[in-house]
């Protein structure tokens, strides 16, 4: 849906997905997002492209407790073969969120480039916002501002561990988890390539599915997604079929018979 062509989000929309926006939103489009998010029950999934300049979108996210930082999560070191910079991020899932409960014991890899997310403090609770980290980079990674340098080092202004790369925010949540009340829910990921067909992992797919179900208040559906069944056809040559026949019809039974005879002979000798 092109935001520039609508005056408001459809009333029958289950949620809003912003996947890797290349260009920043206009003031009018940000107003649309704010009006939608102000509803009692709203659902948003935002997957950021670190290479895009989206200041207005980032300001909107920051006002709700999640500030995307203009850095790259990486690991760099000097080796005997030269400098090595690793942008592919190894990370783990939170153990404190229902979204990541099915994959909390798994580790994952975020391909491409990732930006870190600065999360708001406890003062947000006074505004009715609850921010929860969902994916955290391994301790050896940090958020580097000068990521173009040949050998980046952790410096002032960089994001030091723990480095969060995905988080959720909920507005209007009930203190008692047993109560079901309408709330506005959002998930933000600092990597837009999480579901890229060339690099996506099963655990990342389960994470996104869990995020969508949580956003839509369908917690009972959060879990490991069923794996697809595939059918494979094995083509054998005449020689291979003949060899398979002799192995299963003669060689296999002969080995079993020989083993049985040896056991019988040993017992008879004793």
Image: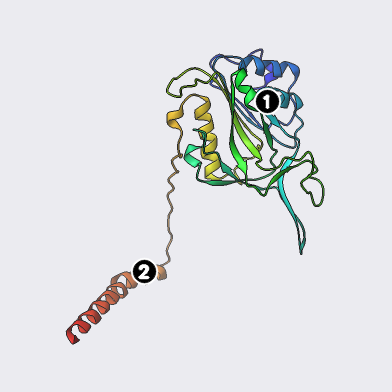
- Which colour style is shown? rainbow
Mark 2 or 1, closer to the camera: 1
- The residue wearing badge 1 is 61
Q: Please tell me which of labels 2 and 1 falls first in the chain.
A: 1
Rounded to the nearest whole Å, what is the CA distance between mark 2 and mark 1? 63 Å
* Image quarter hosting the N terminus: top right
Report helix, strand or loop for mark 1: helix
Q: In which quarter of the image is residue 92?
A: top right
Vertically, is 23 above or below 138?
above
Left/right of residue 187 with respect to residue 223 in the rendered view: right
Q: Quadrant of residue 46?
A: top right
- The residue wearing badge 2 is 244
- Other-residue count near label 2 (Cα within 10 Å), few / some / many at <14 / 14–19 / ≥20: some
Left/right of residue 192 with respect to residue 254 in the rendered view: right
Residue 169 x %, y %: 59, 26
Residue 226 x %, y %: 43, 41
For the residues labelled 2 and 1, say whether their Cβ atoms are less than 8 Å apart.
Answer: no
Q: Which residue is drawn at 59% across and 19% down?
A: 128
């Amino acid at each position: 849906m092109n935001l520039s062509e609508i005056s408001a989000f459809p009333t029958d929309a289950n949620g809003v997905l912003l996947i890797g926006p290349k260009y920043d939103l206009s003031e009018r489009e940000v107003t649309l997002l704010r009006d939608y998010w102000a509803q009692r029950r709203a659902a948003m999934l935002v997957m950021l492209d670190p290479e895009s300049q989206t200041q207005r979108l980032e300001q909107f996210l920051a006002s709700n407790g999640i500030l995307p930082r203009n850095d790259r999560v990486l690991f760099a070191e000097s080796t005997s073969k030269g400098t090595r910079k690793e942008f592919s991020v190894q990370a783990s899932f939170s153990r404190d969120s229902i979204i990541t409960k099915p994959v909390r014991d798994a580790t994952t890899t975020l391909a491409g480039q990732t930006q870190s997310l600065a999360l708001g403090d406890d003062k947000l609770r006074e505004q009715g916002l609850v921010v929860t980290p969902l994916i955290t980079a391994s301790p050896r990674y940090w958020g580097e501002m000068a990521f173009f340098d040949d050998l980046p080092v952790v410096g002032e202004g960089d994001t030091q561990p723990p480095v969060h790369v995905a988080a959720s925010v909920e507005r209007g949540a009930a203190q008692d988890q047993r109560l079901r009340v309408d709330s506005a829910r959002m998930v933000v990921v600092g990597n837009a390539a999480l579901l890229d067909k060339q690099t996506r992992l099963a655990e990342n797919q389960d994470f996104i599915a869990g995020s969508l179900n949580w956003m839509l208040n369908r917690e009972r559906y959060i879990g490991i997604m069923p794996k697809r069944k595939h059918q494979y056809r094995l083509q054998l040559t005449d020689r291979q079929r003949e060899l398979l026949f002799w192995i299963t019809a003669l060689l296999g039974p002969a080995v079993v018979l020989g083993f049985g005879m040896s056991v019988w002979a040993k017992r008879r000798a004793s």
